[in-house]
Image (cartoon, helix red, strand yellow):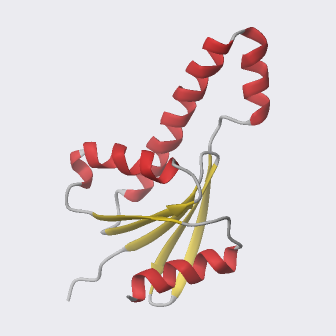
Amino acid sequence: MDIKRKIGIWMDHSIAYLMEYSSDTINTKVIRSKFTHFSKEQSLEKSEHLMHNKEQQQQWAYYHELGEDIKKFDEVFLFGPTDAKAELFNILKKDHHFDKMKIEVSQSYNMTENQRHAFVKAHFLN
């Protein structure tokens, strides 16, 4: 029997908690976007156009880093309070590396670590 590798990802535009799920154990990795409030303030001092371009580049790099980590999984569960999960989902769907991967998206709220782990377990147990 082939064991499926599963990951749940709680994310917003600034941080992602990647929770690898396997037989009731969850290992978490954190990825942070490089676009911080400080970098936004620095860019805005120069120009709004520069700030927007920098934000887009760093957001793409953030999603790309997440995509690289996701490639080794068979099932992905994206959830969080912002549109970031849907943006990442749309990027992954355009990339043929993810064609055979089962990817699901769900709206959620800000959660503690224990709540995120319980949410991932409940999703993959159903």
Whether residue 86 sits left or right of residue 111 in the image: it is left
- The quarter of the picture where residue 77 lies is bottom left
Whether residue 40 sits left or right of residue 74 in the image: it is right
User: 121 or 82, which lies in front?
Assistant: 82
- The quarter of the picture where residue 36 lies is top right
- Identity of the residue furthest to the top in this view: 46
Whether residue 41 sits left or right of residue 70 in the image: it is right
User: 118 or 17, which lies in front?
Assistant: 118
On screen, residue 92 above or below 123: above
Q: Which of the image's four quarters has the N terminus?
A: bottom left
On screen, residue 93 above or below 2: above
On screen, residue 50 above or below 55: above
x%, y% of residue 5? 35, 74
x%, y% of residue 106? 45, 66
Q: Residue at x 43, y 51 (%)?
A: 86
User: 73 or 80, which lies in front?
Assistant: 80
Q: Residue at x 51, y 78 (%)?
A: 120
